[in-house]
């Protein structure tokens, strides 16, 4: 599950990575690309800037490195430059600290050597002890021997040049003389010079042989000694890193910053069934303002467990060995192929998998004239204002719900877990993963028409198939059902309420999500957190998720409490942080989860918990000793060019791809959405208004039929007249009309994603229409769930059978 640990940085290596750098109190921490090379730490806004623009550089030779807490550290060179930095995790921070310390030591050493090189008579380096002196003398002796051999080679080279030139002259003279008395003398001279040349050459060859032999012998010894030093340094670094982590954990435990929530400190609260209502809109009123000046303390403290817990044979801990063994076994089981499982179905034949598209047309850069929208709104009611598609993305809300299945593999692994507590960790990670696509997606999805559906058939590629249907218009609600061959079923019914608070917009999801596993019969349920869209009126839109989620296993009573920390300019925590604790029915904690909802999640097994001293609020602190964390989920990278394709993920790019055989009510067949994806926004706006008017007409007909069916003929005529009179304010709720909340700008409320507008009551709960809609969902039916005690729409069957037969006569004409 976890990624391989990067190698420990060594002196001389270039170390690169992302860090969060404190800029100012307005922007807070900003993500920057840092490069450590040759004793210099430089940073850039992006990796692309490395070739031309450096935003700042600090020399580590004169810098001071200080650690503040688990993720923060400071680098300063005496006041002129100070970098307040934050890593994504404690392990990542320690890797940077190790690399910086090594680079600083090397920079100081190189600076000292460069200063010493300017002296005429450099002093011999001081040795520390007898062993150091012996080693230093041995090295100096070897260097002197090698230097003498090099001098011998130089002398031989000069002699060879000298005698070779003389020999060449003698040979030339020998060719020019005549045969006579001088012949014998010249031959004797040539012989002597040739002998000298041969002797000198032999001497040089012997000197070269000695030099080579000596260099080879000492090279092997030096390489062995160097490797030993490297191994010792690596072991020392790992030991120092572990000691630093333990020291930091103990320091945090001593200072103590947190306490457990009441639901964990009181076992009786955790044992009661049912899902907490923390996600309900009724818990929020107009007095609950959003402040980011103060940060909430972390919910718990984790420290590395005692080494005795890593030994499975420890007899001093009852039942611990078997539990840890079970966890390791289940973790290893995740990596096994399903083909090795005799219970897994074996395919009879291999069919080619359909190739899905990887691109959509780029988003046009259309200028939006707000005045043209406002002048068309003069004299109209708020509910009659049509919102252009400029604020949308070419996907419907039903397709956005289906995006929750992007990380379906987490549920596949959860279905194979034999331990219900470990299975709870996977389910909790799945709930967090559904928010990873929202970090850049500020476009508003199309609100589904009543009766609109969307199927996501990935049975051959991924082993699951999914169906969504818009089951209600007032209040707007969508039902979702997904079933997998791996033994899990996911179902949810979501309605949304929104509150506009001037600077930001809060979207509170209503309804619950349920996940059922066939093998264990475990039944989980949870609710979604609040989504906040900032800078509605002025500035760049950005999205934050905040609140708490209780994932409940209704069979065993297990519970996972997740907390989504709201973003704060003054927080030292990692942005978008999520923490959680998994407890059993008795309130005993077994696992800790941590991470961010836009990147990854990790979980650790709790070996022991202890109560510390009282904190600032008078509550006891709880410290968890945990095993090494394992990565349970990581966000997939966005496809290339995602910024020009509405920041769609790989799955989102395929959701609106045309397919044959889908129902006529499928979102892929929606014309205004298709025109927007193709870049024809003017035609899309006109088609959108036509669909809205058609939906209003169909709604009036349903209301008239409902009135006639429920009244006598005389009363029906009177009530029908009253219905027509009331249509001024009620019938014209458009498919994309703003929420019934006073706003400062007619276009403001339509910025946010997830919006399915509906009327709100005093506490944010949807208000039922004055005229009941005589509408029954086609593929879903409303039931009272006996396990969770909730009322929701569940899939009643028939859709996939109708698709196989190609019979869609029962589908309404909504497009």
Image (cartoon, grey):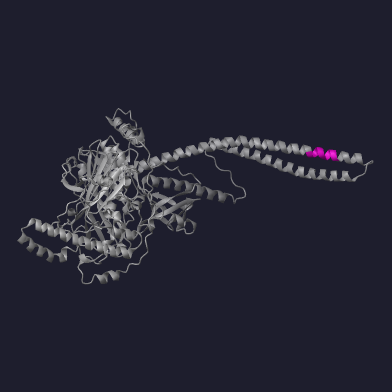
State the image coordinates of residue 357 (x, y, percent, origin top left): 38, 51
Q: Residue at x 20, y 64 (%)?
A: 383
- Quarter where residue 694 is shown: bottom left
Q: In the image, is residue 45 above or below residue 110?
A: below
118 or 235: nearer the eye?
235
Q: Nearer the viewer, residue 389 or 748?
A: 389
Query: Given the current orientation, which residue lies at the most extreme right position?
Result: 180
Horizontal and vertical percent position of residue 95? 42, 45
Residue 440: give x, y in percent of width and height: 34, 56
* Front in this rendered view, residue 476 or 93: 476
Q: Nearer the viewer, residue 370 or 204?
A: 370
Q: Which residues are magenta?
A: 190-197
- 191 in magenta: yes
Is residue 798 toward the left or the right of residue 440 in the image? left
In which quarter of the view is residue 30 placed? bottom left
| One can see residue 28 in this view | yes
Q: Is 15 on the left-hand or right-hand side of 553?
A: right
Q: Quadrant of residue 541?
A: bottom left
Which residue occupies 10% across, 65% down? 721
Q: Determine the main secondary structure of the stretch shown in magenta.
A: helix
């Amino acid at each position: 599950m976890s990624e391989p640990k990067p190698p420990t940085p060594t002196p001389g290596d270039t170390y690169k990575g992302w860090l969060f750098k404190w800029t100012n109190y307005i922007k807070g921490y900003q993500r920057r690309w840092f490069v450590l090379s040759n004793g210099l730490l430089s940073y850039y806004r992006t990796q692309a800037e490395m070739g031309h623009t450096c935003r700042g550089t600090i020399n580590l030779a004169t810098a001071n490195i200080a650690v503040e807490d688990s993720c923060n550290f400071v680098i300063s060179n005496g006041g002129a430059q100070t970098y307040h930095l934050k890593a994504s995790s404690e392990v990542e921070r320690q890797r940077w600290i190790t690399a910086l310390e090594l680079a600083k030591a090397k920079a100081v050493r190189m600076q000292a050597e460069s200063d010493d090189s300017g002296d005429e008579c450099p002093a011999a380096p001081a040795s520390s002890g007898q062993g150091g002196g012996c080693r230093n003398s041995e090295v100096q002796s070897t260097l002197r021997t090698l230097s003498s051999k090099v001098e011998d080679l130089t002398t031989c080279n000069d002699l060879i040049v000298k005698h070779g030139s003389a020999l060449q002259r003698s040979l030339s003279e020998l060719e020019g003389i005549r045969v006579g008395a001088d012949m014998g003398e010249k031959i004797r001279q040539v012989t002597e010079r040739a002998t000298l040349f041969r002797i000198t050459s032999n001497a040089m060859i012997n000197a070269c042989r000695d030099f080579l032999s000596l260099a080879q012998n000492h090279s092997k010894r030096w390489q062995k000694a160097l490797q030993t030093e490297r191994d010792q340094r690596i072991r020392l670094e790992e030991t120092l890193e572990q000691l630093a982590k333990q020291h930091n954990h103990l320091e945090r435990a001593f200072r103590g910053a947190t306490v457990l929530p009441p639901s964990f400190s009181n076992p009786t609260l955790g044992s009661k069934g049912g899902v907490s209502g923390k996600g309900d809109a009724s818990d929020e009123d107009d007095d609950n303002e959003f402040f980011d000046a103060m940060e909430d303390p972390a919910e718990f403290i984790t420290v590395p467990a005692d080494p005795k817990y890593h030994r499975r044979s420890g007899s001093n801990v009852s039942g611990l060995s078997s539990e840890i063994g079970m966890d390791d076994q289940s973790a290893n089981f995740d990596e096994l192929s399903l083909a090795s499982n005799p219970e897994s179905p074996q395919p009879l034949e291999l069919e080619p998998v359909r190739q899905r598209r990887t691109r959509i047309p780029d988003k046009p850069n259309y200028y939006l004239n707000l005045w043209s929208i406002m002048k068309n709104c003069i004299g109209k009611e708020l509910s009659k204002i049509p919102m252009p598609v400029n604020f949308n993305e070419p996907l419907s809300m039903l397709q956005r719900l289906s995006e929750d299945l992007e990380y379906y593999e987490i549920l596949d692994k959860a279905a194979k877990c034999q331990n219900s507590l470990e299975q709870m960790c996977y389910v909790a990670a799945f709930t967090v993963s559904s928010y990873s696509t929202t970090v850049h997606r500020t476009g508003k999805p199309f609100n589904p028409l009543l009766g609109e559906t969307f199927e996501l058939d990935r049975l051959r590629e991924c082993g699951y198939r999914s169906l969504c249907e818009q089951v209600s218009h007032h209040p707007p609600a969508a039902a979702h059902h997904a079933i997998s061959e791996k033994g899990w079923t996911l179902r949810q019914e979501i309605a949304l309420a929104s509150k506009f608070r001037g600077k930001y917009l809060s979207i509170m999801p209503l309804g619950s999500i349920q996940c059922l596993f066939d093998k264990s019969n475990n039944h989980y349920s949870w609710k979604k957190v609040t989504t906040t869209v900032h800078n509605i009126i002025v500035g760049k839109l950005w999205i934050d998720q905040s609140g708490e989620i209780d994932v409940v296993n209704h069979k065993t009573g297990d519970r996972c409490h997740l907390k989504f920390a709201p973003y704060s300019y003054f927080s030292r925590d990692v942005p978008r942080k999520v923490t959680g604790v998994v407890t059993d029915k008795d309130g005993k904690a077994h696992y800790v989860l941590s991470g961010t909802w836009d990147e990854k999640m990790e979980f650790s097994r709790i070996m022991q918990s202890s109560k510390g001293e009282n904190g600032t609020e008078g509550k006891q602190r709880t410290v968890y000793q945990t095993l090494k964390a394992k990565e349970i989920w990581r966000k997939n990278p966005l496809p290339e060019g995602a910024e020009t394709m509405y920041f769609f993920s790989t799955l989102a790019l395929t959701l609106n791809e045309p397919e044959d055989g889908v129902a006529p009510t499928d979102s892929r067949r929606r014309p205004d959405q298709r025109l927007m994806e193709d870049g024809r926004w003017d035609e899309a706006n006109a088609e959108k208004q036509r669909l809205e008017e058609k939906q209003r007409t169909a709604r009036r007909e349903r209301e008239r039929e409902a009135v006639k069916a429920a009244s006598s003929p005389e009363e029906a005529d009177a009530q029908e007249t009253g219905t027509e009179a009331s249509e001024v304010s009620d019938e014209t709720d458009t498919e994309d009309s703003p929420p019934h909340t006073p706003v400062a700008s007619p276009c403001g409320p339509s910025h946010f994603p997830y919006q399915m507008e509906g009327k709100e009551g005093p506490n944010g709960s949807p208000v039922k229409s004055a005229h009941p809609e005589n509408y029954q969902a086609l593929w879903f039916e409303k039931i009272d769930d006996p396990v969770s005690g909730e009322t929701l729409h569940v899939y009643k069957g028939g859709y996939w059978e109708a698709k196989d037969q190609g019979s869609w006569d029962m589908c309404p004409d909504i497009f």
